[in-house]
Image: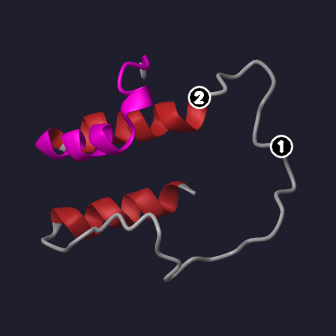
Amino acid sequence: KNFRYELSFKVWQCGGVVEWVPCSHVAHAYRGPRSHPSYVPGASPYQTSINHLRVAHVWMDEYAEYYYRREPAIRNLKFG
């Protein structure tokens, strides 16, 4: 799961292009049903959003604003 973000940022930092196309199905890899629950008891139900927010804050610099515009509801979450 984290590999896709790591690879995206390596491409982006080396002059490549990362595009967010929410309606695209190109290069989608279906992995089938999960073998574990997506919600971990005791964890924040927003953990995935918190992780994405942390990545945007740490790696994207001024480009994080594009992410915040796309996901305005999570802008004020505490990400640690």
Which quarter of the figure has residue 60? Answer: top left
Residue at numbered disc 1: 37
Residue placed furthest toward the bottom: 26
Residue 74's place in the image compared with 65, above or below, is above
Question: Where residue 54 appears, x then y in whole percent?
Answer: 38, 33
Please report the residue visible at 47 percent of the width from the left and 69 percent of the height from the top: 23
Prevailing secondary structure class for the magenta stretch in the rendered image: helix
Q: Element at badge 2?
A: loop
Q: Which residue is mark 2?
A: 46
Name the quarter where the N terminus is drawn: bottom right
Q: Which span is picked out in magenta?
A: 62-78
Q: Please report the residue visible at 17 percent of the width from the left and 46 percent of the height from the top.
A: 63
Q: Are marks 1 and 2 in contact (CB under 8 Å)?
A: no
Residue extending farthest to the front is: 23
Q: Is residue 34 left or right of residue 45?
A: right
Q: 36 left or right of 27?
A: right
Where is 29 relative to 35, above or below?
below
**Mark sitting earlier along the chain (1/2):** 1
Residue 70 is a magenta residue: yes
> How far separated are the C-alphas under marks 1 and 2?
14 Å
Give the crowd class for mark 1: few <14, some 14-19, many >=20 residues within 10 Å: few
